[in-house]
Image (cartoon, rainbow, N blue to C red):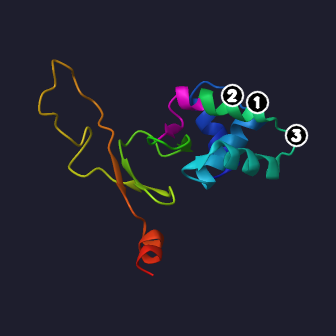
Amino acid sequence: MTTSEGIEKVLRDASMRVTRPRVAVLAAVTAHPHADTETIIEAVRQEHPTVSHQAVYDSLKLLTSLGLLRQIQPHGHIARYEARVGDNHHHVVCRSCGSLADVDCAVGAAPCLHASDHHGFTIDEAEVIYWGLCPNCQSTKTA
């Protein structure tokens, strides 16, 4: 989904109208995984200066609700977005600088983890966030 044509196909396959803001937002999130809204707006406006903040917000909300984007919001942090969807991967967050990275499923296929008691639920997804210090913050702390 890195070309404009690929992004347009993804939108059409989701039965969505292809609009400049939607294409630009999908392209920005694909190019900047785990970006916050302001970073996405800046990236969109570099290519399309007339796209409004509201168009970006609306596109993020719609694309997320349709499952084309995933919103990640670790506790105490602002929302971030990624185009990697559908594989139930997890994330690691730096407690110091807030950097975020993908972590593939720890064990087997989704839902990756087995609940000790499922309380009658059919579990189809597990959301895990690992916390720690990134390599940069580790070296800063030891210096």
Relative depth, front residue between 11 and 112: 112
Asked if the residues shown at circle 1 and circle 3 are in contact, with their CB atoms under 8 angstroms apart, the answer is no
The x and y percentages for residue 12 are 63, 30
Q: Is residue 142 visible?
A: yes
- Give, as a three-letter code, the residue at label 1: Gln
Asked if the residues shown at circle 2 and circle 3 are in contact, with their CB atoms under 8 angstroms apart, the answer is no
Which label number is shown at residue 50?
A: 3
- In the rendered structure, which segment of residues is drawn in magenta? 63-73
- Quick check: 22 left or right of 99? right
The x and y percentages for residue 23 are 70, 40
User: Which of the 4 image quadrants contains residue 58?
Assistant: top right
> What's the residue at 68%, 50% (across, down)?
39
Instruction: For marks 1 and 3, give the one nearer the viewer.
Output: 1
Which label number is shown at residue 58?
A: 2
> What's the residue at 46%, 69% (across, down)?
137
Which label number is shown at residue 54?
A: 1
- The Cα–Cα distance between marks 1 and 3, rounded to whole angstroms, is 11 Å
> What secondary structure is found at the residue carrying circle 3?
loop
Q: Is residue 19 visible?
A: no
- Give, as a three-letter code, the residue at label 2: Asp
The x and y percentages for residue 73 are 48, 40
- Give, as a three-letter code, the residue at label 3: Thr
